[in-house]
Image: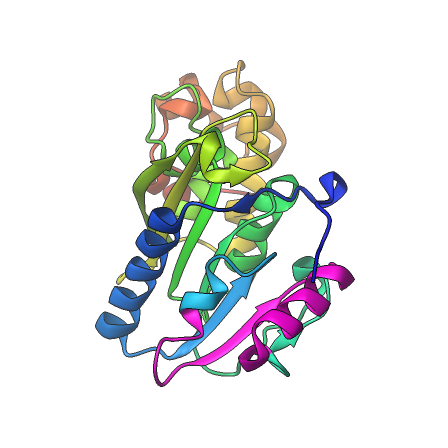
Amino acid sequence: MQYTLKKSLGQHFLKDENICHKIVDALQQTITNTAIHNVLEVGPGAGAITKYILQIPGIDFKAVELDDEKVAYLEHTYPAIKDKIIHQSFLDVDAPYAAPFIVVGNFPYNISTQIVFKVLEWKELVPVMIGMFQKEVAQRIASKPGSKVYGIMSVLTQAFYEVEYLFDVAPGCFNPPPKVMSGVIKLTMKNEALEMKNKRSFFVLVKAAFNQRRKTLRNATRSLFSEDVLKDDIFNKRAEQLSIDDFAALTFKMQ
């Protein structure tokens, strides 16, 4: 049974078995360490990783796939996946488990950042995520203060998760080869929650600060604080100079 590749869905299918094994090994290690047996794969495509996940004993596995053709291909090629596919866009699905679950996948590049934001919405249920991204997106998520690529994604993700950059993946490992390098990262829920006024204030502050990242914090976030608070020296800095703790602490001073 054949399938076609759809550029519109950002499809680049893994064909390198070694990379598939490395991703599944990271997943199996996580299952062993956390004793979480609910696993959700995002964008199984032609089943490069899926075929190995299906062999992991004792897990409750589900996969989210939007493409009709891939759903038919997966069900035909891997009969064990029957009734485990959620045939929708990942961005539209509700959390598929009531208990904690691990998210894994070679994410469609055109929605990869939105996938991370969706996981952040579900963070109480997702202690670990292992995902393949374009390398520059993976680096952005993992970057530290002071870096040129440190931004909204870095701060919002690292406020809740430890980010570990696992390994690079070359274009030749895919069909069709993307024009860029890829990278696999692992997000692990932090043991201690960051103290902040509330999540909404944190998101608003971080987005305002980085949306005008060339400006000082004072000019970028003026509408969020009283004139008195804005006199503080920290407002002389630019967004990329602030740590995640700095942003969290500032939420308590917002109007």
Q: Can residue 65 be found in the magenta stretch?
A: yes
Question: Residue 237 in the image: x percent, y percent?
Answer: 40, 19
Q: Can I make out residue 136 in this image?
A: yes
In the picture, which quadrant includes the C terminus? top right
Residue occupying image coordinates x 52% and y 64%:
41
In this picture, residue 144 sits left or right of residue 141: left
Q: Quadrant of residue 139?
A: top left
The magenta segment: 53-81
230 relative to 72 in the view: left or right: left
Query: How did the renderer colour the structure?
Result: rainbow
> Residue lying furthest left in this view?
33
Could you tell me residue 44's position as x and y percent? Answer: 57, 60
When the figure is inspected, residue 173 is found, relative to residue 58, above or below; the finding is above
Q: Residue at x 36, y 40 (%)?
A: 244
Q: Nearer the viewer, residue 10 or 170?
A: 170
Q: Residue at x 51, y 55 (%)?
A: 199
- Out of 149 and 170, give the one closest to the viewer: 170
Q: Position of residue 221 (x, y in %)?
A: 57, 29
Residue at image position (58%, 52%) is: 115
Vertical placement of residue 77 versus 203, above or below: below
